[in-house]
Structures are given as C-alpha cells and as structure tokens.
Amino acid sequence: MQMDEIMVKLLILSEDQILISEIEDVGSEMGEPDCKLINPFIVNGDNLEPWLVSLTNQNIFMIHSDKILTLIDPKPTLLEKYQQLTK
C-alpha cells in the first residue's frame, strides 16, 4: 500500500471481527496508530453494520496495523453493497 492511497478492503482483525472499510496507510511515529479506517462496517454474513455505531457517531478511526491479521479484496457483491451504504 502506498502512502495516501485509499482502497476498500476486508480486514480480519485479531479480535475475530471482520470489517469492510476504506483504508489508508498513514505515516506515524513508532507506537502510534498507522491505519485510517473510513466508514468501517462489521461484516456479519450478508449484513453490514457500522462499526462502533452504539458508541460513537464517528466514521473515521485510527487503528494499529498489528491488530489486522490480513487484508483481502471483498467479493464484488459485498463491495457494491458497501458502496451503496456509504454513498
């Protein structure tokens, strides 16, 4: 991933959560969060629910990349559903 490049990916988190989100790699100091998640949604089967919706109205979050086990491309149908929800 190049700096300032934004893409939509599925994120498998170390807490056994699956998110779909725009993700941006940001330069940071050692120990600071280095990934920006924009409009993250929890993937639960065919359902998408905004991440942390019960706690905040924010739609941009910073996360440490060490909390992400892997990044993968979503299936086209899931990507389309996500894009419809984030318009």
Image (spheres, rainbow, N blue to C red):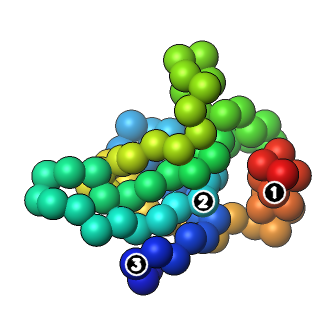
Residue under numbered circle 3: 3
Which amino acid type is marked by label 1? Gln
- How far apart, in angstroms, are the residues tagged by discs 3 and 1? 23 Å
Image point (65%, 42%), residue name: 41
Q: Which quadrant would the N terminus be assigned to in this image?
A: bottom left
Vertical placement of residue 33 versus 59, above or below: below
Name the mark on residue 83. Answer: 1
Residue at far bottom of view? 2
Circle 3 packing at 10 Å, graded few (<14), some (14-19), many (20+), is few
Whether tag 3 and tag 2 are in contact, CB under 8 A, the answer is no
Helix, strand or loop under label 1: helix
Of mark 3 and mark 1, the one earlier in the sequence is 3
Which amino acid type is marked by label 2? Glu
Which amino acid type is marked by label 3? Met
Whether residue 25 is visible: yes
Image point (51%, 77%), residue name: 5
Image point (14%, 52%), residue name: 31
Q: Does residue 37 appear left or right of residue 40 in this picture?
A: left
Whether tag 3 and tag 1 are in contact, CB under 8 A, the answer is no
Q: Which of the two marks, 3 or 1, is nearer to us in this view?
A: 3
Total label count? 3
Q: Nearer the viewer, residue 6 or 69?
A: 6
- Picture coordinates of residue 56 (x, y %)? 55, 22
Q: Which of the two marks, 3 or 2, is nearer to us in this view?
A: 3
- Picture coordinates of residue 80 (x, y %)? 85, 61
Circle 2 packing at 10 Å, graded few (<14), some (14-19), many (20+), is many
Vertical placement of residue 82 versus 58, above or below: below
- Picture coordinates of residue 45 (x, y %)? 74, 40
Whether tag 2 and tag 1 are in contact, CB under 8 A, the answer is no
Q: Nearer the viewer, residue 20 or 83?
A: 83
